[in-house]
Image (tube, rainbow, N blue to C red):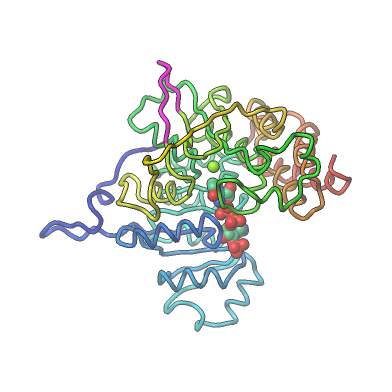
Amino acid sequence: MESSTRSEERGAPGGAGEGAAPRRRKRVVLLGATGSIGENTVRVLRAHGSELELVGVAAHSRTRALLEIAREFGVRHLAVFEERAAAELRAAGAGVLPAGAILHAPGVEGLESLALLPEADVVLVAVVGTAGLRPALAALGAGKDLALASKEILVLAGAHVLAAARRSGARILPVDSEHNAVFQCLQGQERREVRRVILTASGGAFRDWPEERLAEARVADALKHPNWAMGPKITVDSATLANKGLELIEAAVLFDLRPAQCAAIIHPQSIVHCLVEFCDGAMLAQLCPPSMTFPIQHALLYPARGGRGAEAGLSLDRVLGLEFRPADEGRFPMLRLAREAMERGGAAPAIYNAANEVAVAAFLAERLPFLGIARVTEATLAAMGAAPAAGLAEVLAADGEARARAERLVAGGGA
Ligand code: NDP
Ligand code: MG
């Protein structure tokens, strides 16, 4: 990953010396503004108003929440993915939009045109699933930094996203907390001296449930995450550890690691976000409270750190217990399936992601039991065999086929 600095981003916020031009704020486009990452980004933007300016926002269909953000920050460019919601907003007329604001086209075109706004410096992609892929590629192609929360994009098309960044010299700044932590630990280090990257996992809602009870786990149980407040899909992925599985794949892509160099460990406190082990056996760790405002602030302000953020850091005034346990692949089959998919390579990670997405949606709709998520994913991977190393078109085809197969498995009773 590119890690060079840009002179205009340095220095104290707004701190131009006498005669120097005032430093302009970094301009941010936020795709997925109304979600959990979006909400945390808004907190970061409020805390860093002198360094960051919000210039574009997009959501899927929750127009009211999107308009609130747009009005608060005086955002000029908006996009709503869903056609009906976009049409309603258009019908409501200019009165509901902030003065002078433009509503871009619905669908992926609108997301792309926000990503390509000439004034944008950094595009934060935080939409669930893979709808952010084309906008992410567009942003990188135009030389804009990509602050990336949507892990599915790297799982599906990691090589293409990295190639787009290499071609334009734009940076990929990881927002996912563990990857942002690894990114921080790797600053100033030699990549060839990295032995292993270990991502921590809270263990999710069922960490302390006896294994035999998992068969009866309900949606409401899975959504009770012990440490993090996140969107429903990723909260279920935390309960199955598919989230960590996707993150292992994401880490291999982002940091150019072999599957055997990526590991996961259970850390119930979610304070240590990663451990990076070097060839001499030393490890570096990154610690901060379990809140996404920390990695979001880091990614948006990088390479500066900015002052105090939206929240206070860790307090060491009281005892801070940090506990680590091995992640049991028997109890968490989605972790094993992710490792197998990584080793298989080609379209296998995309198949894993697609089948999991379908299965989680079915679980959330109470059409599939909790344990069915791993069963559907495993059966989809098995049915599609070893897809060869593939170009983007083949990966997208495998994604589509995996979704159709997983749907059929769900309809047939969950494999
Ligand atoms: P949420 O479900 O809370 O929010 C999703 C956001 O994306 C909403 O703003 C939603 O709009 C928008 N959205 C969904 N589909 C589209 C689309 N097709 N076009 C435009 N906008 C769309 O998800 P999270 O914020 O939890 O997660 C977002 C991404 O970040 C995921 O990829 C997740 O894996 C990743 N991530 C999340 C973390 C977290 O702490 N939440 C941590 C690390 C990574 P609307 O409200 O209108 O539906
Ligand atoms: Mg994470």
In the foreground, 273 or 254: 273
Which quarter of the figure has residue 213? top right
227 on left or right of 13: right
Q: Residue furthest left?
A: 18
The stretch drawn in magenta includes residue 285: yes
Q: In this view, does 373 lie above or below 293?
A: above
In the foreground, 113 or 79: 79
The stretch drawn in magenta includes residue 62: no
Query: x, y percentage for residue 240?
Result: 68, 40
Query: x, y percentage for residue 294?
Result: 42, 48
- The reply to whether residue 249 is visible in this rendering is yes
Which quarter of the figure has residue 46? bottom left
Q: Classify the position of ligand 1 by quadrant: top left, top right, bottom left or bottom right.
A: bottom right
227 on left or right of 352: left
Q: In this view, does 415 lie above or below 385?
A: below
* Residue at x 49%, y 77% (from the top left corner): 97
Q: In this view, does 222 lie above or below 72?
A: above
217 on left or right of 19: right
* Residue at x 32%, y 39% (from the top left corner): 4
Q: Quadrant of the N terminus?
A: top left
Query: x, y percentage for residue 143?
Result: 40, 49
Q: Residue furthest front?
A: 318
Q: In which quarter of the image is the C terminus?
A: top right
In the foreground, 261 or 350: 261
* Residue at x 46%, y 29% (from the top left corner): 275
Q: Which residue lies furthest to the top in this view?
A: 280
**Span highlighted in magenta in the image:** 276-286
Query: x, y percentage for residue 199?
Result: 53, 33
